[in-house]
Image (cartoon, helix red, strand yellow):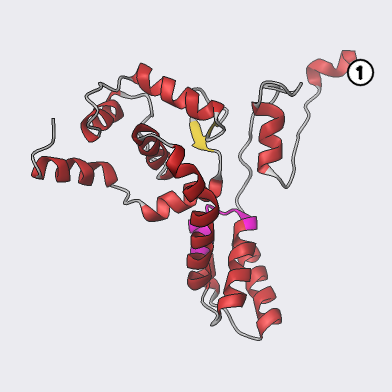
């Protein structure tokens, strides 16, 4: 085996994102930083059609596949979450996956975001909102630094170095995780990311600044 090591490539896969992250992203396990995450191709329409058929078999109701497909997109193509939405739709009936998605969101708010939110500072929440919308601006760019410094009223200047310290703290708390590319991060709990994306306007920073300026509180 030692002679094969330079050519040997090992792929780790599993049904639990949390378990995989704990193997490679926490300091104590022996596999810490010995692998990098890879993005797999997203599941396509045939998967959505299969879930709609399962729903029909369970309820005898016909679900609109296009509606379920739109929900799958909002779930960032996570199959486990789509399964949960289908179950919520079975419980709520009629066969509207958008209603099931709303029920799923309420569950995520109760079990995910509500637990994390009280522990977060204002700067933490701004970083999470930025990542939830997958904005193209880097967390450590000068543009976002200006936006954050304008949004917050604590009198601090949020330089890229200060933001890096915030990100490091959130990573140690397992709220953020590196994506495998330099200076790229994502929200560890995908359900929280989806909830934030659905409940925070995409242009939240611009609106926030406009409100502060209108009220005379902008710096």
> Within 10 angstroms of label 1, few (less than 14), some, or many (20 or more) residues?
few
Residue 19 pos. (x, y %): 71, 38
Q: What element does badge 1 sit on?
A: loop
Residue 196 pos. (x, y %): 42, 49
Q: Is residue 196 rendered to the left or right of residue 201?
A: right
Q: How many marks?
A: 1
Q: Nearer the viewer, residue 139 or 66?
A: 139
Residues rendered magenta in the picture: 70-80
Q: Is residue 167 rendered to the left or right of residue 37?
A: left
Residue drawn where x is 55% and y is 39% of the image: 188
Q: Main secondary structure of the magenta part?
A: helix
Q: Quadrant of the N terminus?
A: top right
The residue lying furthest to the right in this view is 1
Residue 18 pos. (x, y %): 66, 40
Q: Is residue 73 magenta?
A: yes
Is residue 154 visible from the viewing direction of this image? yes
């Amino acid at each position: 085996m030692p002679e094969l090591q330079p050519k040997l490539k090992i792929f780790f896969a599993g049904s639990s994102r949390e378990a995989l992250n704990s193997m490679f992203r926490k300091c104590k396990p022996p596999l810490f930083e010995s692998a990098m995450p890879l993005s797999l191709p997203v599941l396509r329409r045939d998967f959505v059609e299969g879930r709609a058929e399962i729903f029909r078999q369970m309820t005898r109701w016909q679900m609109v596949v296009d509606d379920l497909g739109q929900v799958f997109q909002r779930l960032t193509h996570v199959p486990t979450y789509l399964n949960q939405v289908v179950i919520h739709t079975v419980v709520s009936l009629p066969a509207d996956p958008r209603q099931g998605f709303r029920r799923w969101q309420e569950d995520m708010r109760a079990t995910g975001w509500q637990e994390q939110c009280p522990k977060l500072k204002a700067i933490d929440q701004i970083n999470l909102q930025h990542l939830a919308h997958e904005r193209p601006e880097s967390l450590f760019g000068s543009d976002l630094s200006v936006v954050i410094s304008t949004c917050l009223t604590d009198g601090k200047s949020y330089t890229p170095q200060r933001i890096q310290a915030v990100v490091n703290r959130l990573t140690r708390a397992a709220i953020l995780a590196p994506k495998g590319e330099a200076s790229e991060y994502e929200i560890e709990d995908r359900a929280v990311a989806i909830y934030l994306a659905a409940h925070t306007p995409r242009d939240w920073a611009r609106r926030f600044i406009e409100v502060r300026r209108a009220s005379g509180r902008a710096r």
